[in-house]
Amino acid sequence: MNILVIGTGGVGAAVAAVAQRRDFFERMTFADLDPARPEALVARLDDARFAAAQVDASDAASVAVLASDTDFVLNATDPRFNPAIFAAAFESGSGYLDMAMTLSEPHPEEPYSKPGVKLGDAQFAEHERWHGAGRLALVGIGVEPGLSDVFARYAADHLFSEIDEVAVRDGANLTVEGYDFAPTFSIWTTIEECLNPPLVWERERGFYTTEPFSEPELFDFPEGIGPIECVNVEHEEVVLVPREIECNRVSFKYGLGDEFIEVLKTLHKLGLDSKEPVSVRGAEVAPRDVVAAVLPDPATLGERMHGKTCAGTLVTGTGVDGEPRATYLYHVADNEQTMREYGSQAVVLQTALNPVIALELLAKGTWNGTGVLGPEAFDAVPFLDLLRAYGSPHGVTERPA
């Protein structure tokens, strides 16, 4: 298999560190706007299967040329670049994977009750085109979305006869020395998903939205992380899961913490979350890009980080034995361990594991399909078996039903 990875930030670099230990691919090319980044990554890993290239991810034609002899394009950039890379993969004849889907647009009149353009709508609109071409676009195959969807598929196939709710819950006790505010993942993406109207799906009601940070609940995370208040956040699982899994409700909540929420609210009040360029001394600059530029690169924080991060899916309903059941399937990444074993901080490593596993399943023919599909469309067992083989198994806890 020949793979092209667009983007060599924290997640792209972690993809390389994970893939280096596997033998399912012949060549993996890493490309970025700044050629020094992939060149340094390839030199550091010193693996003949890795190559470096330069590309502008916003230029679909250039990406298509680079991807012309590629089996799969893995998009490891911010989701704002999805349209160009998604289109380029199709034009090049390649398959496609990403870890976050095309961006949403709030409803113009009622943003906090009705959805406008939903996450991934632009990609799902291309399903028949990809299906007709006999090729696969596997969207949302990070950790959330991604592994969280695999958990939902496993629960539906093996643990439950009926599912009431698929409730994705994410929390961490990570700290970063030396910074008052240092997001552990792309601040550009964090602003997008946290300040947009959160999306919820219910069978009887369909999709609807709420105010950002709504419906707080205290969720007890495993492996020493403990109770964290989680709030509604816009996320792809709410769009993906109902497409394949019979259930009554899908929600996503994230343990952000009061301080983090207040910073995000302040950025919004000041207009610093805007993606629209403003003129600054003759230069056109998007305020959100300025925020991203002044904050530390999450990929560089590993040595200063301590603690664990947990991504998981709480499934409630009726078990296969006919009794009420509530099961939390989860994955924990310990920063000390991920830094020691991969040289990558916990959040980006936890994200990067999943597209590499998916690529291995696709290379071996264990997973196959055509069209635009999410992870919940595939058998979960081989994925979770490989997650264990990669040395990072998932966990399961039963909750009061």
Image (cartoon, rainbow, N blue to C red):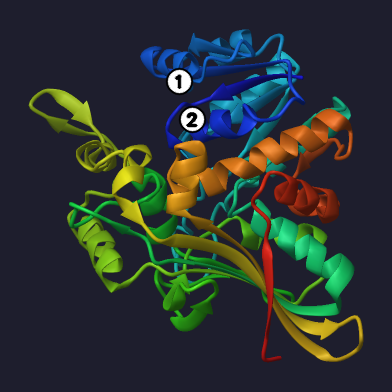
The residue pinned by badge 2 equals: 13
Q: Is residue 27 left or right of residue 268?
A: right
**Circle on res. 297:** none
Circle count: 2
Q: At label 1, which amino acid type do we have?
A: Leu
Quadrant assignment, res 21:
top right
Categorize mark 1 by other alpha carbons within 10 Å: few (<14), some (14-19), many (20+): many
User: Which quadrant of the rendered structure holds the C terminus?
Assistant: bottom right
Expressed as whole percent of the image width and height from the top left, the position of residue 260 reads: 29, 64
The residue pinned by badge 1 equals: 41
- For residue 125, above or below residue 57: below
Q: Is residue 377 left or right of residue 89?
A: right
Expressed as whole percent of the image width and height from the top left, the position of residue 194 reads: 40, 60
Expressed as whole percent of the image width and height from the top left, the position of residue 90 reads: 71, 22
User: Which quadrant of the rendered structure holds the N terminus?
Assistant: top right
For the residue pair 278 and 34, the one nearer the viewer reads as 34
Give the residue displayed 22% in from the left and 55% down from the top: 181
Expressed as whole percent of the image width and height from the top left, the position of residue 27 reads: 68, 15
State how far apart marks 1 and 2 are (Cα).
Answer: 7 Å
Residue 125 visible in the snapshot? no
Q: At label 2, which amino acid type do we have?
A: Ala
For the residue pair 364 and 93, the one nearer the viewer reads as 364
Q: Is residue 94 left or right of residue 11?
A: right
